[in-house]
Image: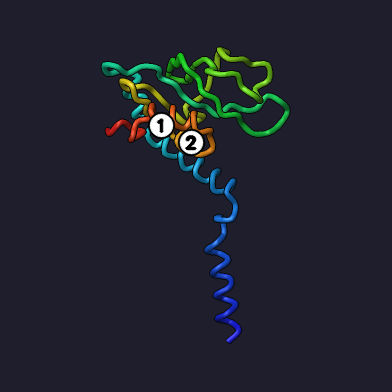
Amino acid sequence: MKQPLAFAIILLAACSAGTDDPEAEFQRELAAARDQARASLSVFWDHFAEPGAGEYDFSLKGAFPRRDGQSGVEEAWVDQVARAPDKIVGQLASAPHYLGDLQKGAIMEFQESQVVDWAFFQGEKLLGHYSTRVMLPRMDSLQQEWLRSLLSDDPRGGE
């Protein structure tokens, strides 16, 4: 009689794991968004190579090693993207926090394996921005409203 009760308690504890920690759930959602962005990166490169009418502002989000003495990476958007066979080059689109003395506009060289998100405009709608979509609930209402008006319903643009 004691074994089924103990098993039921363990099963309930296992089922509730992960739901009690909102930050852990948020990190799982961000990781899934990165995976989706990486899985659809070919959409970005196809449009980047031959932009359609009204397609512009191609940006990538890269994971760059921190330069402040701490381990880990800082994810930062780069624009003015150029692609070479062995690297990607772009400019930091905003001031980073943990990349040493680098400022907005600094030239960054990185590998495709460092890309964690992508974005471009197709007309008046932003495609990509997988991580931004996950972060929306954490933004203030004005930011949410503004971004929701820009983000496409489908991050891939319905392809």
Decide: is 9 above or below 48.
Answer: below
Residue 71: x %, y % from top left: 68, 33
Q: Quadrant of the C terminus?
A: top left
Residue 28's disc number: none
Q: Quadrant of the N terminus?
A: bottom right
Q: Residue at x 60, y 29 (%)?
A: 74
Q: Residue at x 47, y 37 (%)?
A: 34
Decide: is 94 above or below 142.
Answer: above
Q: Is residue 34 left or right of residue 106?
A: left
- 36 and 138: which is toward the camera: 138
Q: Is residue 121 left or right of residue 76?
A: left
Distance between the Cα atoms at labels 2 and 1? 8 Å
Label 1 near label 2: C-beta < 8 Å? yes
Q: Quadrant of residue 45?
A: top left
The residue type indicated by label 1 comes to: Arg
Residue 40: x %, y % from top left: 37, 34
Residue 58: x %, y % from top left: 40, 19
The residue type indicated by label 2 comes to: Leu
Q: Which of pointers 2 and 1 lies earlier in the amino acid sequence?
A: 2
Q: Residues within 10 Å of mark 1 (few under 14, many from 20)?
A: some
* Residue farthest toward the bottom in the current orientation of the protein: 1
Residue 144: x %, y % from top left: 47, 32
Mark 1, residue position = 148
Mark 2, residue position = 136
Query: Which secondary structure lies at badge 2?
Result: helix
